Amino acid sequence: MKVLALFLSVLMIFGMLTACKTKEPKETPTTGQEANKPEEEKPTEPAEEEAPSEDEKEQAENELPREETLYFAGQQWGAVVGWNVLGDGNNNSMALAASGSGSRTIMFETLYMYNMLDASYTPLLADGPYIWNDDMTEMTVKIKSAAKWSDGTPVTADDVAYTFETNAKIENNQGLAFAPYIESVTAVDPQTVLIKAKLDDSGKPVNPLQVQQFIVQVYIGQKAWIETVETRNNNDATAIKNDVAEDVVYSGPYHKYFADDTKVVYVRDDNYWGKDASMWGKLPVPKYLAHAIYSDNAAAQVAFEAGEVDVDQQFINNVQDLWEKKGLPISTYMAEAPYGICVNMPTAWYNLDNPALQNAAIRKAIAIAVDYDKINANAMTGQSPTFEQVPRSCMNPTDGEQATFNHDAVKDLQWVGNDIDGAKKLLDDAGIKDTDGDGIRELDGKKLSFIAACPDGWSDWQASIEIVAAAGKNIGIEITTQYPDANTFQSTVTSAKQTDYDIFMMWTESASPTQPWGRVRNLMSSEFNGKDNNWSGNYGHYSNDRIQELLKKIPAETDEAKLKDYYTECVEIYLTDIPSFSLMYRPDKFHAVNESVWTGFPEAGDGLNIPPLDCTDGYGIAALYNLTLVQ
């Protein structure tokens, strides 16, 4: 109970995650090194940075200055493919990771930075708060006059408008995500952006929540550079998205220094506009950000414990042992379990293209038979509240989301797991029995045999999938585990249709301006069915007309009682149909730090209000301006 009380007390910092706040960035304490002072804006274009010399490249290939380099693990898997702000297949997770919970902005920037701790919006390229008109059909955003591209030209409203137009035109992931909700983005003048929401038949905005997510999620590209890419690719949408974009113009504080199949390194742009007093007032402290490409979690953890990694975004078994037993200078955002703020729900999805899994009794039997306490103890090592502490729904454990539905109305549909007898009875009552005595039940004369999968090397997920497979064995269903490499796995489960995996793990949406609507959509919306390269959700291809109706009603509804009824109905449908089932609660990003070289990382209760998002995501990037070297 002590652990639960601590966990819930931390969650009290969350209000409703759809609250609309705008904050100016706090001035972070001066570092041990002299803070970079803002320079006066110069009318002339900054000198073009020289390409790395052969000596510099050799240095990057071998060893960077340790006291100038912040090393990461857990963000980049596999070699970088491209640098294209318009592309979907860059596999460049340090530079290009757009998310409603806070996009990664070390190289490309958004209008605002989202802070999941208090649902606030801190202006980045934007100047001051966004302004809705009275009926929330139009939003106005100003652009900072200090904001500049890496080629020295100003960031303008035209860049914002052209980015939206191009995303929609070429139908990349960001275009597909927001074009259904935004009618237009126009430049009123060089510093003023007008965003018009799409309206329904009654003249109301289709989804103002998505407009608010647009301004914290979508990277802004330079219009002139986008036009260059369009020209060299003959305006072919596929070619534009696949352009490697080595010449990309960016606005963020870091850019490519070196990349191969062993590591990727970013170097600080000392001309970065953000040192202006209207933004950070200084440059980020580390000169280099580097990420070795590890084979798996275990290899990265060895490097982390050795002090070769400073910021680790991956699950670590019994993370507390690193400081309690090994005495290492390692810490997490919270000093006690669950060690991070759990806003995500890694989920086992059923592939509903498999005829056997279209049987609801089979889906429910597997789900209620799984031993979730064992997953929490073995796979998560206690770094998650249990489903007894926070009963399952479509909502994460935060107070704001838990208040959005009627708990009493769904309590009879919830389960805590390890109900082997109940699962067997459910299957027996449905006539799904073992008729030949081999221990495996049959449906329509075919043995129930499924493949369960997750990426190889993702140790907590693999442990979870093994427990799912064991549950199947306990109730007469054969579940065989497979662990392909992450790229193969993800390209398979995000395809329009696949027959490789019957049960597979993927994450859900975390904290963002659209929650919990966004997670209901993520879990059950049929709008994603039949689409290749679908990273948006409903990976098992579930379909329910009533869910689609509710997803349309919720965003524009202002009556709190009606909203609660709608969300309660969503939970009822999810727990009845069970198109997927969450295995645990966990943080949006794991955030463990080794303070052998650097210190000053975000901690719960430090008063800085910087979220534990690995110093790179949303307002979490503020941490890069607050680091000091260990003395």
Image: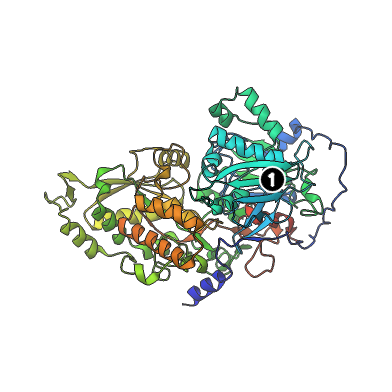
Please tell me which residue lies in front, 117 or 471: 117
* Quadrant position of residue 498: top left
Q: Residue furthest bottom?
A: 2
Return the residue at label 1. 193
Q: Residue furthest front?
A: 202
* Quadrant position of residue 157: top right
Q: Could you tell me how many numbered marks the image carries?
A: 1
Residue 252: give x, y in percent of width and height.
71, 44
Q: Residue at x 55, y 32 (%)?
A: 170
Q: Is residue 427 left or right of residue 245?
A: left
Q: Residue at x 52, y 67 (%)?
A: 400
Location of residue 124 with respect to 239 vertically, above or below: below
Question: Tag 1: residue type?
Answer: Val
Residue 278: give x, y in percent of width and height.
79, 53
Location of residue 538 with respect to 471 vertically, above or below: above
Q: Is residue 310 visible?
A: no
Q: Is residue 494 left or right of residue 619?
A: left
**Element assignment for label 1:** strand
Please tell me which residue lies in front, 631 or 361: 361
Q: Residue at x 46, y 77 (%)?
A: 1
Q: Is residue 502 left or right of residue 237?
A: left
Number of other residues with Cα within 10 Å of mark 1, as a class: few under 14, some 14 to 19, many 20 or more? many
Residue 458: give x, y in percent of width and height.
46, 50
Q: Is residue 523 visible?
A: yes
Residue 291: give x, y in percent of width and height.
62, 45
Location of residue 300 with respect to 487 vertically, above or below: below
User: According to the image, what is the colour scheme of the structure?
Assistant: rainbow
Quadrant (top left, top right, bottom left, bottom right) of the C terminus: bottom right
